[in-house]
Image: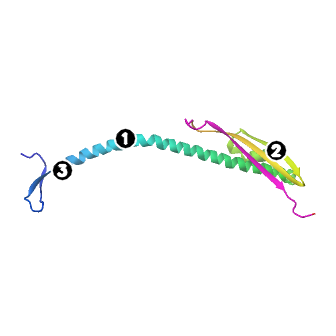
Amino acid sequence: MLNCRRVGVAIEPDSEAVPVLFKGDMTMQNNNRNRRGTALVEAAVVLPVMILLIGIAVDYGRIYYSTVTLSGSSRNGAMYEFDPYSYDESNYTSYTTAAQSDASNLGTNVTFSKSTSTVSGTTTVTIQSNSTFRMLSSWYFLPNQTSINRTIAIRQVQLVPD
């Protein structure tokens, strides 16, 4: 009459014993199979989104690194140009080689320009640096390349009054 593996008895208050049928291991096997399919569908939906977010984070980190490196290289070139003793004691031959030594990780697409001005006894050396940054991969909503521009200005002030 019953084709189940186990038969249990459920007792409810103020009632007679009612037989309850347990399916046993058959339910666990079906649930595991359904759960594996669910996990596969979840992975198929979430994995592309996660890869996209990781790729964007890597490109953003590279842009940030390039910007900080370009600022440091501009500062190095400005310090070389500003310090009168650096011409004799430095290993660099010009402000561009001083700046380029810090920007060696950015590649060959880095350019530097210099301007010097004197206003009421204060000399200002300004170094402008430009670099073109290329993304690792092309995203539909982000540009494939972007220009990074940095300007560093160093002013000489008089330490001892006249």
Task: Give the CA distance from mark 2 to mark 3.
Answer: 82 Å
- Looking at numbered disc 3 in the image, what kind of residue is underneath it? Gly
Q: Mark 2 or 3, which is nearer the eye? A: 2
**Residue bearing mark 1:** 41
Q: Is residue 149 magenta?
A: yes
Judge by depth and name the residue closer to the eye, 129 or 98: 129
The reply to whether dot 2 and dot 1 touch (C-beta < 8 Å) is: no
Task: Locate the N terminus by quadrant.
Answer: top left
Q: Quadrant of residue 59?
A: top right
N-terminal of the two: label 1 or label 3? 3
Q: Mark 1 or 3, which is nearer the eye? A: 1
Q: Residue 63 location, x and y as percent?
A: 63, 45
Q: Identify the secondary structure beneath mark 2.
A: strand
Task: Give the CA distance from mark 1 to mark 3.
Answer: 27 Å
Q: Residue at x 73, y 46 (%)?
A: 150
Q: Residue 144 location, x and y as percent?
A: 61, 36
Q: Residue at x 80, y 48 (%)?
A: 126
N-terminal of the two: label 2 or label 3? 3
Q: Residue 29 location, x and y as percent?
A: 24, 46
Residue 24's disc is 3
| Label 1 Cα crowd, 10 Å radius (few <14 / some 14-19 / many 20+) | few
- Looking at numbered disc 2 in the image, what kind of residue is underneath it? Lys
Q: Is residue 145 magenta?
A: yes
Task: Give the CA distance from mark 2 to mark 1.
Answer: 58 Å
Residue 19 is left or right of residue 150, and the answer is left
**Residue bearing mark 2:** 114
What stretch of residues is rendered in magenta?
138-161
Residue 11 is left or right of residue 131, and the answer is left
Q: Residue 88 location, x and y as percent?
A: 87, 52
The reply to whether dot 1 and dot 3 touch (C-beta < 8 Å) is: no
